[in-house]
Amino acid sequence: MWARWIAYKSLSFDADAGTFIGQLSDLLMEYSPQGNRVIFLIDEIDRFAAMFFEGGSRKKLATDILWQIRHFIAERRDIGIVFAGSSAAREVFISNPESPFFNSIEHLELSPFSTRTKQQEVSSRQIIEPGQIRYRHVISRESLEHLVWVCSGIPYYMKLVAGATYAVATQSHILVSDVNAGLRALLSKSTGISKLDDMGGDPGADDLRTTVTLERNSDGVLVRAVLYAVADLHSPISGHRVLRGRVSSKESKLSQHYRLPKEMIERGIEICLKLGLLKLAASESSQELFFAIPILGESLRNSSARHWALVDHELSAISANVLEGIRQ
């Protein structure tokens, strides 16, 4: 044990990513049976995506780190790395030709929970029906489908919404309206369950993490503002979709209050689609937008005034720059 501690202390913590991972791998294999491989799991790679989308020095730093890892993987066949993240990370790891891993990484997409088959329904129920409530509440297939849809099949959100639903339900048979009431209680922190009401942050808003560093530039502000505008136009859990043109119409705060030009709003919509935060349903006569994760949209709608206040200064500055450009 002491020898391992000495070896651990000798690692080059200030070295580049490839060198450090290599040293750590050698240390792990030294105390493992011969012939074993070392597999690293790197979670939350959305942080790399956020740095990449921010551009400038942050993009360069993310790209440099990924190149270090890429070169290291190419040289060491006894080591593997699994990256885990959301759809926004595809831009960094798969679809962008500038990516160090472009055309060199196997992409596996985990299927969200659903109710399409009987086995999938059973699996979903195992997530949202803990043993202590299984015989106190009955959730119909219709209500289960709605809950899974609201949470986009993400188990963490499913557990939160289910817990809030059971907390506020007034009868044993859970209806769709009970799921919606549970979600609203969760967002307003009024479920009466301390573990739910005392959580930090806004449930559902975790998936905005890919835009956290983007807040410092105009595109990041624009992305968030577009999401707020879409959430304001229709309740995302109502099932109604938003006509794309309405986001840049006088109904939208982006146009009515901030007077942003349609071209700028459209750019924000395209970035949202690229990040996987919004989805597009297109037909011959119209294009409709909806949230990829309805709980995210409802969370933004629930705290709309606060969210708009957080970007008001930046949006006003963008608006002023646009008007100044028009005058010139």
Image: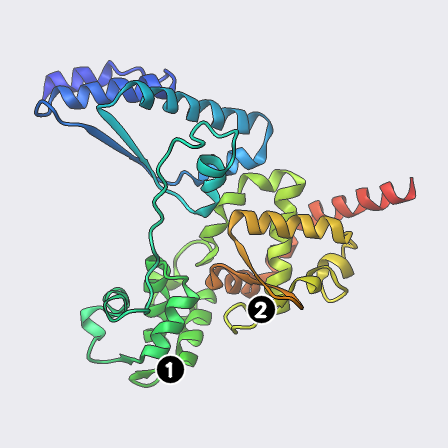
> Which residue was labeled with disc 2?
241
Q: CA distance from mark 1 to mark 2?
A: 22 Å
Q: Check disc 1 and give the amino acid type.
A: Leu
Q: Given the image, on which type of amino acid does mark 2 rest?
A: Arg
The location of residue 42, given as percent across then percent down, is 33, 35
Judging depth in this view, the residue of 81 and 26 nearest the camera is 81
Q: Quadrant of residue 137?
A: bottom left
Which residue extends farthest front?
284
| Residue 133 appears in view | yes
Image check: 131 left or right of 320? left
Q: Could you tell whether 188 is left or right of 35 in the image?
A: right
**Closer to the observer: label 1 or label 2?**
2
Q: Is residue 88 above or below residue 160?
A: above
10 Å crowding of disc 1: few (<14), some (14-19), many (20+): many
The vertical placement of 143 against 40, above or below, is: below
Residue 97 image point, x, y percent:
52, 31
Task: Assign the C terminus to one quadrant of the image.
Answer: top right
Q: Residue at x 51, y 38 (%)?
A: 50
Q: Which mark is residue 207?
A: none
The residue to which callout 1 is attached is 175
